[in-house]
Image (cartoon, coloured by chain):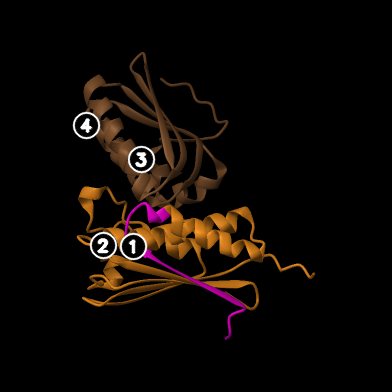
Chain colours: A orange, B brown
Amino acid sequence: MKALNEMELTFESRSTNESFARSAVAAFIVQLDPTIGELNDIRTAVSEAVTNCIVHAYKDEIGIISVNVRIMPENSVIIRIRDKGCGIEDIQQAMEPLFTTAHGDERAGLGFAVMQSFTDKLTVRSKPGKGTTVTLKKTLSRRLSDG
Amino acid sequence: MLKSNYSLEEGVLTVRLSGEIDHHSARTVREETDTLIQQKRPHELRLDFSSVTFMDSSGIGLIMGRYRIMGLFGGYLRVVNVPEGLEKLMILSGLGALKVIERQGEARESA
C-alpha cells in the first residue's frame, strides 16, 4: 500500500536524542488529528524503541538510528525504527516482559511490552551483528476532516 | 527536560518532578535522590509526579529502584499525584501491586 505522506530522520545514538525522536514523530503525526491519548501512546512506544537502540544496539559505541514514519490510508501510521547495532540473539526472550540485559542501568525490562500494548502491531526483525528493525503500526480513531 | 526539586521535612524526603522522564533524564534524578537517601536516611520518600508530562518505562525503573532502596533502609516509598495520562503505563508495569501509587487528587494520610 502506498503511503500518503512519509518522513525519515537519522540521528546519532545519544540519549539526548530520545526526546528529539519522539517529539519529531509526534509532530509529524499531528496532521492525522490524533487524540491526546493516541499521541501519547506513539510518543511512548517510539521512546522505548529508540532507547533500546541506544542502550542495547549501540551499547559501547555511537551509531546511527533511523526512524521512518509513513502515513497510510485508513488513518493508520507505520513507524520503523532501525539500527545497525549488535542485533538480538533471541528475539522471543528479549520480548518477554521484565527480561533485561541492562541491569546496571535500572531498566525495567518493559520496552517491548510497552511498544506492544501502546500500538496495534509490533514486528521485530534482527540479525546478530547486523542490526535490528522494529516496526510499529497504529490505526488512529479519528478521521481526517475534509477541507 | 526534567527538573527536580528536593525538600526534607520531618524525615520525609519529597522529590517534585516536572517535565519528561526518559532514559536520559532519569539518570540525574536517580543519582541525586539516592545520594540524599544515603545522607539523610528519610523514613519516607515521596515522589511527586504532578508536573510530569511524559514518561516511558524508564520512569517505572526509577520507581522500582527507589522502592528497593527505601526498603533496604527500612523506609517506604509513596508516588503521589500521578496524572491520568501516565496511569496506562503504571498499570501495565504491574506497579499497582506495590501499593505505592496515588493518583492526582487522591489524598491519603500517611501512617
| Near-viewer residue (B110 or B24) | B24
Q: Nearer the viewer, mark 3 or mark 2?
A: 2
Label for residue A84? none
Which chain does the numbered disc 1 sit on?
A
Which chain does the numbered disc 4 sit on?
B
Please name the amino acid that badge 3 sits on: Ile
Dot 3 falls on a residue whose secondary structure is helix
Tell whether label 3 touches label 4 (CB within 8 Å): no
Query: Which residue reaches farthest right?
Result: A147
Q: Is residue A56 above or below residue B18?
A: below
Read off the residue under disc 3: B63
Q: Residue at x 35, y 58 (%)?
A: A51
Q: What is the C-alpha distance between the residues marked 3 and 2?
A: 28 Å
Label for residue A12? 1
Read off the residue under disc 4: B72
Q: Quadrant of residue B13?
A: top left
Magenta segment: A1-18
Q: What is the C-alpha distance between the residues marked 4 and 2?
A: 36 Å
Q: What is the C-alpha distance between the residues marked 4 and 3?
A: 14 Å
Q: Residue at x 55, y 34 (%)?
A: B104
Q: Earlier in the sequence, mark 4 or mark 3?
A: 3
Q: What is the C-alpha distance between the residues marked 4 and 1?
A: 38 Å
